[in-house]
Image (cartoon, rainbow, N blue to C red):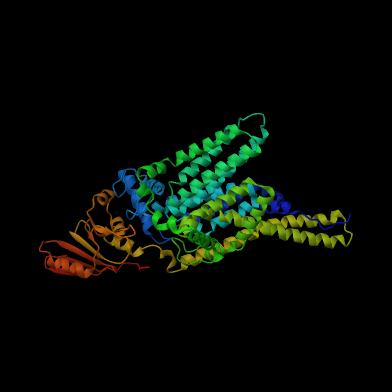
């Protein structure tokens, strides 16, 4: 029997590129897939939990604000502003109200382990690991084992996913969790509806599991509104998207009107349930609810021409390879890098393959993945195009890139197969002689998967080594000098009548108060003196006994004071001056840090 070049239509090629697991199931790790998953997850967990208090170097002001509020909530039932069980948490000023889910999560961790950077960042690390689990579950079920392996390793070593999993910022760790949680739940819900709805054509009844999955999807969509402001818009779009999926499957494909109404009602009720606190906040306190919108969204009256150019420019920025893959060490919100360079250009290849598959095969899983990615890009397109507002895509991009890897591998394997068949066809070789070639191709796919995952891991380790070994990157977004300065003042609050702190930095009062040992009760009752900037940030010149003024102004105030008080003046380098009566004493204190 002679062999000729075998051709495959484009639909079959794309299908194999997305889900190519038949040959892998017989490989040496085919029956140990969950062991493979557990090994990668343990490594990812170690990368997210090890030395939380040192990498990144403590601590960004937004992180510290969440930790202080969470610790105050755990100790007193109120945040540091004195609001009991807040729905919206006031950050560093009246223009910085945000949903309070992150505050409650840090309240749990700091309530158990006490105030500290590592304890405050623990929820971010745990939810980062949970998001990896959902990436595996979603990709393994709908795209196959090989795609799931690559997606998991990409996500585990993704620089921005890794860094956001080590920072307690709601726009980071909560966004990357809810993005994959909503996509996973919607994909499971529509697949269950498709499976059971088309089998049971005799009536409108459906198994309880179908309703349960749509309810879970609604809860995730609703709860995402309590995480970050940008996710409120995403949640609204996901609600409409989920209703459209139900309408198409039940109304157009199955032609079951009662099913459509029931599932839309269930989805809507659970979305409302999950978002109930934010719905109440929007109605009862609209100024706080929309506090940050005016500063990040241009006026709607700017005109269609402006908005078209504005959104196109933002979209081009967020999809630019330079922005996604070649940004290491450049400042962008709380991250120093975004996607692993190992995923370039496979992210774009995967997007093309998925869109082609959606057109030819009409797969719900592909539709949910691409639709979810587009929805999470919307907040960054209509507002300032910053990393935090599109943080949801960092859990979805690895899945798309993994599809690109698999599609490229299938294309290469098919070219090799065609070449081998041509060689044997000209020599009259029978089918038995070609079987070893087919077996080799099957093993080559397994070897290729291991090589791809190893390559991604090597690039990831190199990025980690570069980050840890750099003198500036770990402390780029923190204010470590304020942390150490605050620690050096432990015990001083009770010894002096006034403590003047002469140093540079943002929101100095928060660092000094938190790390000098002030309790949540003392922060809530502290005397405050300062002003609000035009951007809505609070800037204190006095917080309890701490005064934030230059040294010469503090000395001038001391000379004019006729009261017998004992003051302490502290400079940024740790030098301290003790002022008592008419004399002062200089005390040199060497702090083990350098300002970054």
Most foreground residue, 183 or 543: 183
Count of marks placed on residues: 0
Most foreground residue, 25 or 400: 400
Q: Is residue 236 visible?
A: yes
Q: Is residue 249 left or right of residue 393?
A: right
Image quadrant where one finds the C terminus: bottom left
Image quadrant where one finds the N terminus: bottom right
Residue shown at the point (50%, 49%) measured from the top left? 177
Quick one: which residue is furthest to the left in this view?
562
Q: Is residue 407 left or right of residue 591?
A: right
- The image shows residue 369 at horizontal and vertical percentages of 59, 50
Residue shown at the point (33%, 52%) measured from the top left? 68
- The image shows residue 51 at horizontal and vertical percentages of 43, 58
Q: Is residue 307 left or right of residue 144?
A: left
Q: Is residue 41 visible?
A: no
Please tell me whether residue 122 is drawn above or below residue 550 in the rendered image. Answer: above
Most foreground residue, 93 or 502: 93
- The image shows residue 332 at horizontal and vertical percentages of 45, 63
């Amino acid at each position: 029997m002679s062999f000729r070049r075998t051709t495959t239509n484009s639909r079959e090629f794309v299908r194999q590129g997305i889900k190519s697991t038949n040959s892998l199931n017989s490989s040496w790790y085919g029956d140990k897939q969950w062991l493979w998953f557990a090994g990668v997850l343990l490594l990812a967990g170690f990368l997210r939990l090890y030395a939380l208090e040192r990498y990144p170097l403590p601590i960004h002001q937004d992180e510290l604000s969440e930790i202080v509020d969470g610790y105050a909530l755990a100790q007193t039932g109120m945040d540091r502003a004195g609001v009991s069980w807040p729905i919206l948490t006031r950050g560093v000023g009246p223009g910085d109200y945000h949903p309070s889910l992150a505050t409650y999560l840090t309240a749990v961790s700091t309530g158990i382990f006490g105030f500290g950077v590592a304890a405050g960042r623990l929820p971010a690390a745990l939810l980062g690991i949970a998001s990896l689990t959902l990436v595996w579950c979603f990709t393994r079920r709908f795209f196959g084992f090989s795609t799931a392996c690559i997606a998991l390793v990409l996500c585990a070593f993704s620089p921005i996913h890794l860094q956001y999993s080590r920072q307690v910022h709601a726009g980071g760790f909560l966004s990357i969790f809810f993005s994959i949680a909503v996509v996973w739940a919607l994909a499971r819900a529509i697949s269950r509806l498709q499976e059971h709805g088309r089998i049971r054509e005799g009536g409108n009844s459906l198994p309880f599991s179908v309703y349960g999955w749509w309810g879970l999807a609604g809860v995730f969509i609703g709860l995402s509104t309590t995480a970050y402001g940008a996710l409120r818009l995403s949640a609204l779009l996901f609600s409409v998207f989920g209703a459209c999926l139900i309408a198409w499957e039940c109304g157009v494909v199955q032609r079951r009107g009662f099913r459509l109404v029931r599932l839309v009602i269930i989805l809507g009720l659970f979305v409302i349930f999950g978002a109930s606190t934010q719905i109440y906040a929007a109605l009862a306190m609209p100024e706080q609810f929309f506090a940050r919108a005016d500063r990040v969204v241009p006026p709607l009256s700017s005109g269609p021409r402006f908005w078209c150019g504005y959104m196109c420019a933002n979209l081009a920025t967020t999809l630019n390879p330079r922005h996604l893959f070649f940004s290491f060490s450049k400042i962008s919100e709380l991250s120093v890098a975004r996607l692993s360079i190992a995923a370039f250009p496979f992210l774009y290849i995967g997007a093309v393959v998925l869109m082609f598959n959606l057109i030819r095969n009409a797969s719900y899983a592909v539709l949910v993945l691409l639709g979810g990615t587009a929805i999470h890009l919307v907040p960054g397109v209509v507002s300032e195009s910053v990393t935090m507002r599109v943080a949801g895509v960092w859990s979805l991009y690895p899945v798309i890139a993994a599809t690109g890897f698999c599609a490229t591998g299938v294309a290469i394997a098919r070219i090799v197969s065609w070449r081998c068949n041509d060689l044997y066809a000209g020599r009259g070789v029978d089918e038995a002689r070609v079987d070893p070639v087919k077996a080799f191709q099957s093993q080559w796919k397994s070897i290729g998967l291991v090589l791809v995952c190893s390559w991604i891991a090597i690039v990831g380790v190199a990025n980690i080594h570069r980050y840890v070994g750099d003198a500036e990157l770990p402390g780029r977004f923190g204010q470590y000098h304020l942390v150490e300065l605050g620690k050096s003042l432990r015990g001083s609050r009770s010894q002096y009548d006034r403590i003047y702190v002469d140093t540079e930095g943002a929101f100095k009062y928060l660092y000094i108060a938190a790390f000098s040992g002030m309790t949540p009760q003392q922060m809530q009752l502290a005397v405050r003196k300062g002003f609000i900037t035009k951007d809505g940030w609070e800037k204190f010149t006095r917080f309890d006994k701490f005064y934030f003024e230059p040294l010469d102004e503090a000395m001038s105030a001391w000379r004019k004071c006729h009261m017998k008080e004992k003051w302490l003046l502290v400079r940024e380098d740790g030098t301290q001056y003790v002022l008592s009566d008419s004399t002062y004493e200089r005390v040199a204190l060497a702090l083990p840090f350098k300002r970054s």
